[in-house]
Amino acid sequence: MSINTIQTIDQIATNPRVRSGRPFIIGTTITVADIAVARVFMMMEAEEIADYYRLTLAQVYSALAFYYDHKAEIDLSIEQRRKLAEEMKEKRTGSRHPSLFR
């Protein structure tokens, strides 16, 4: 009879004061969603993501594992943030200059 010892990788955290409570990589402010977008939507390889964000491969793979464990809720968050960005763009929210084409 063998006894399994469960191992965990503690690379992902949430904190309401960091990135609005979205899951992020410990020691950074890079969200799991940032990594998911890079991999799933931009088709970047893990090594490219690690280089781009200056992360270790372990951090990238931890974020991807977390993403796939929580895919539905993170995909929803990504879509909501995309829609918000689109609305802000249409309204020119945050623009210091008025539109030339009103």
Image: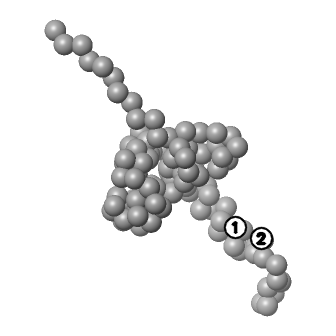
Q: Seen from this angle, which residue lies furthest top? A: 1
Confirm whether residue 67 shows in the render. Answer: yes
Instruction: Pick the residue in front: 70 or 4.
Output: 4
Residue 93's disc is 2
Confirm whether residue 68 shows in the render. Answer: no
Q: Is residue 27 above or below residue 38?
A: above
The quadrant of the rendering that contains the N terminus is top left
- Estimate how packed mark 2 is, as few (under 14), some (14 to 19) or many (20 or more) residues with alpha carbons within 10 Å: few
In which quarter of the view is residue 84 placed? bottom right
Q: CA distance from mark 2 to mark 1?
A: 8 Å
Which percent across, then down, holds residue 13? 55, 39
The quadrant of the rendering that contains the C terminus is bottom right
Which percent across, then down, holds residue 14? 59, 39
Residue 25's disc is none
Which percent across, then down, holds residue 9? 40, 35
Write down the residue under mark 1: 87
Q: Which amino acid, mark 2?
A: Thr
Q: Is residue 19 above or below residue 39?
A: above
> Who comes first in sequence, dot 2 or dot 1?
1
Question: Could you tell whether 23 is left or right of 84 in the image?
Answer: left
Picture residue at 64% right of the left edge, 50% below the top: 19
Picture residue at 55% right of the left edge, 47% below the top: 27
In which quarter of the view is residue 65 placed? top left
Instruction: Pick the residue in front: 33 or 25.
Output: 25
Q: Which amino acid, mark 1?
A: Glu
Q: Contact, CB < 8 Å: mark 2 with mark 1?
A: yes
> What colouring method underlies this structural image?
one colour
Assign a secondary structure to mark 2. Answer: loop
Question: Could you tell whether 29 is left or right of 49 in the image?
Answer: right
